[in-house]
């Protein structure tokens, strides 16, 4: 129990030594830049690749939702409900919305979304470049941490 006999001065000197050994904080440097131009083709390529990824996700989600609805028996419940309402004993939801039909529809919608997403990326690049010429661009701050 030698630490009980230490004075306040001795403890503070130990703390001071540890503090001196601790790494010093680096000075953070801040930089403010203006974004005055977006490269048209870079943004078109980026929007195209993003739309492709979202299209793949869309098709996979559509197939998974169909498989979940089929495995939980919801299509059977819907068949019974529509047969009672319509009075047609041959009605089947899965005949109208089979897995290949749902996947094909999702694929067509995804392809349209790729075209529209790419076009919107191009329009955004043109509008931003026009607005940046008029306003001087977007001021962005960066900090080295």
Image: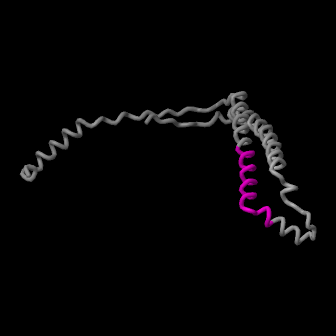
Q: Name the image quarter holding residue 26.
A: top left
Number of labelled discs? 0
Q: Nearer the viewer, residue 50 or 32?
A: 50
34 vs 50, nearest the viewer? 50
Viewer-closest of 143 and 5: 5
Q: Which residues are magenta?
A: 57-77
Q: Is residue 31 left or right of residue 72?
A: left
Residue under the point 88% across and 72% down: 84
Whether residue 64 is situated above or below residue 78 in the rendered picture: above
| Residue 71 inside the magenta-drawn segment | yes
Query: How far from the left and from the top, in percent, is residue 25?
Result: 34, 36
Residue in the picture at 73% in, 53% down: 67
Question: Left or right of 32: which side holds 45?
Answer: right
Residue 112 x, y percent position in the rendering: 82, 41
Residue at 47% x, 36% y: name it.
143
- Image quadrant holding the C terminus, namely top left
Q: Magenta region, mostly helix, strand or loop?
A: helix
Determine the image quadrant of residue 128: top right
Where is residue 92 drawn, in percent x and y?
A: 87, 61
Above or below for 69 versus 103: below
Q: Is residue 17 left or right of residue 108?
A: left
Q: Is residue 5 above or below residue 91?
A: above
- How far from the left and from the top, in percent, is residue 11? 14, 47
Q: Is residue 92 left or right of residue 20?
A: right
Which quadrant would residue 76 be assigned to in this image?
bottom right
Queried whether the magenta region covers residue 12, the answer comes back as no
């Amino acid at each position: 129990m030698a630490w009980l006999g230490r004075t306040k001065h001795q403890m503070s000197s130990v703390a001071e030594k540890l503090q001196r050994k601790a790494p010093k904080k680096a000075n953070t440097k801040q930089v403010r830049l203006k974004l005055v131009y977006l490269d048209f083709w870079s943004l078109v390529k980026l929007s195209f690749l993003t739309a492709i990824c979202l299209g793949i996700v869309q098709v996979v989600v559509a197939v998974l939702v169909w498989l979940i609805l089929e495995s939980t028996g919801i299509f059977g419940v819907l068949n019974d409900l529509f047969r009672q309402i319509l009075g047609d004993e041959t009605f089947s939801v899965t005949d109208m919305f089979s897995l290949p039909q749902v996947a094909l529809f999702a694929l067509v919608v995804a392809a349209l979304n790729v075209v529209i997403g790419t076009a919107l990326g191009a329009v955004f690049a043109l509008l931003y470049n026009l607005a940046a010429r008029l306003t001087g661009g977007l001021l962005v701050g960066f900090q080295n941490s």
